[in-house]
Amino acid sequence: MTDNTLSLRYLFGKGSVLLVLKLFSAFIGFCFHVYIARKLSLTEFGLLNLALTCILFIVAIAKQGLEPAIVKGFAQVGLRQIAPLYQHIIVYTLINLVMVCVIFWGFANVIFTSLLATPQLIDMLPLIIVLTAFQTWLGVNSSVLKGQQYPLLSLLFTGIVTYCIALGICLHIESLSAFTVLTILAYSTLIAVIISFILIKIKLRVGTAFFKFSSLESSGFVNVLSVSRVLFVSSIASLIAQQLGVLVLAKYASLDDVGLYSVALKISLLLSYPLVVINMITAPRYAKLYGDNQLKEFKVLAKLTTKLLILLASLMLLFVAFFAENLVVLFGEKYYEAAPFLIVLAVGQWFNLSTGSVVSMLVMTGHEIIHRRNMIFIALFTSVALFLFVPIYGVIASAWVTSISMISLNLVSLYFVNKHIYKLR
């Protein structure tokens, strides 16, 4: 049996249920935003997406890069360490949340009024704080389940439960506003969090052991924390490269422009899902092959998946190029002007897919520091370029800067994969 055949069997024989569930998660989230976009005015939709983007940044700061570190930590601990490790993580995130939310609350007026030029967000501040806490714990619990070999249950809390509940509620409400939708999301996320805690108790059997304190070293928390600190910078830098454009538009453009750009960004991010799914399947395989010094098999798998991704990326880019207007008007006729921005962002996604799993390869082969350095460079470039060009050119500048940042990251990552992995004998 050839190496290609073995790789194909591995690729399509593993994670087929995960793939379906991940795609369903993307689909239900997309349906929710399509419905909301049609119900809200362009300005209200822009306001909602601005609030959600703020939450993304606050959550990333509160989680401190914990999610991938938790997955790794819980995959390695023994049965007696599960409850103590979970206890320390919950306490740590609680302390982080209190500190981050108190600081954000204190500076909210400056952030919303001066930096984002959107004082309407002040009325949403309590909801933003609440959603930050709920999403942080949801991310933690999802990572714990994933680390303990419950990937299907883990995927339920990456948006499926929350958006199913939220969409069901929204369908029964005649008049919606950005504030109402954010409130519905808060209640929906709370329900998802409660379910996740129940599943943690059942599957991990933490029970009363949760309240028995142990040392940080013996629980494995110190190792989790050290890994998270390395990944924290990368996670913030990645968020800046993808989402900072929304915040800069709020400052220098209008909420209508934020709404248009958000629609183009949401559709373009769907194009990355083939890569996301393939990374879910191949990431542990890359780690094992590299660790076992099976570089030939590593390269075969990488070459095969990259060819597949190039084909998919090319087909999707052609589809977007011909049907961009049809895609954006799914959100409503008022989003017709978002079509050019979608095409620009789709070009960036073509490079994201066509270079293959280069970012995943760097991380899975112990080159996290190189990846972190790359992300810092890209984040700095993105920040400077956005603040230089968005005030002059508006939404199209945000789309081009985001797309160029994505292209640059993947090309730089490909260079280091070639240098540190492919050229090894």
Image (cartoon, rainbow, N blue to C red):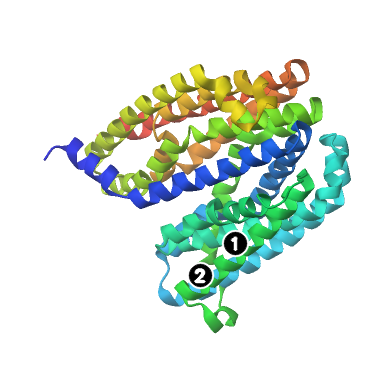
Placement of 155 over or under 252, stated as above or below:
below
Quarter location, residue 257: top right
Percent of width and height locating residue 76: 41, 64
Q: On the rendered structure, is 105 left or right of 136?
A: right
Q: Residue at x 63, y 26 (%)?
A: 381
Q: What residue sits 73% from the left and 50% below the top? A: 182
> Residue 99 placed where, x, y %?
76, 59
Q: Residues within 10 Å of mark 1 (few under 14, many from 20)?
A: many
Which quadrant would the C terminus be assigned to in this image? Answer: top left
Mark 1 — residue? 192
> In screen coordinates, is 223 left or right of 187?
left
Height in image: 357 above or below 324?
below
- Residue receiving disc 2: 199
Give 159 or 276, whichever is nearer the viewer.
159
Q: Position of residue 101 (x, y in %)?
A: 77, 56
Q: Amino acid under label 1?
A: Ala
> Of the residues under marks 1 and 2, which one precedes in the sequence?
1
Residue sitting at x 56%, y 32%? 267
SS for tag 1?
Answer: helix
Q: Is residue 241 visible?
A: no
The label on residue 113 is: none
Position of 203 relative to 259 (above/below): below
Whether residue 152 is visible here, answered yes or no, is: yes
